[in-house]
Image: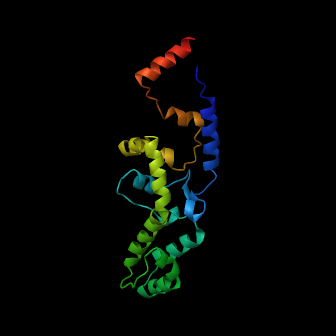
Amino acid sequence: MVSIQPKRELLSLLLKELNKRPIFDGPVESRYLVYNSTEDLVSYISGQSSFKASVKDITDEEIGKVLQEIQNAQSLESLQDLMVQNSAMLQTAGCFRRVRSCEEKKKIVEEYLKWYIIHRNNTAIERFKAGLERLQFLTALQQHPTVLTPVLCHCDVKLSAAEMENLFQPELSQQKATRGLRKRRL
């Protein structure tokens, strides 16, 4: 009989490590996606078009503070001042432009959030999607996003290796199933 203990141990160790990290980690040239991803990111990975991120989703305190200030700007003049003060940050994301009305603040924040969460990490996201596809998890995620999104998003409930293992049901070919039955009989 084949032991599942090594798989369970690997999943336990993996979940323990992933749980300690922010959404992306590592050097710029080799970033990787980790445990507490947002629903918007999972939605993007699964091919859904909705994007409803908020400033709360930004883990960098300084960037979150700047976006909050832009979002709370009361006048066109204060918005323009904030745009100039934070021009380098906004230029990096392609959001820096001349604003003509205070209503543009919502669009600026939305564009920055999309860049921060999705576009700046595109290479890492594509590699992650390729890995999910190899495991045939991406297809399942696309077919059942409401069921599987909580698995990829951070929540206060701890996910155990046993629970993770129970999410998947192996489908063995007839040949492998017959071989497995023979091994069990011996």
The quarter of the image holding the N terminus is top right
150 or 174, nearer to the observer: 174
Q: Residue at x 57, y 41 (%)?
A: 159
The residue located at (56%, 59%) in the rendering is 31
On the rendered structure, is 163 left or right of 46?
right
The residue at 45%/55% (across/down) is 126
Image: 10 above or below 73: above
Is residue 14 shown above or below 125? above
Viewer-proximal residue among 15 and 3: 3
Residue 72 seen by the camera = no
How are the residues colored? rainbow
Q: Indicate whether 143 appears above or below 41.
A: above
Q: Quadrant of residue 171?
A: top left
Q: Residue at x 55, y 72 (%)?
A: 63
**Rendered location of residue 119, percent (x, y):** 45, 65
Q: Residue furthest top?
A: 185
Quadrant in which residue 50 is drawn: bottom left
Judge whether 167 appears above or below 68 on screen.
above
The total number of labels drawn is 0
Q: Quadrant of the C terminus?
A: top right
Residue 38 in the image: state x and y as whole percent.
49, 55
Q: Position of residue 15 (x, y in %)?
A: 60, 44
Q: Nearer the viewer, residue 115 or 75?
A: 115
Residue 93, can we see it? yes
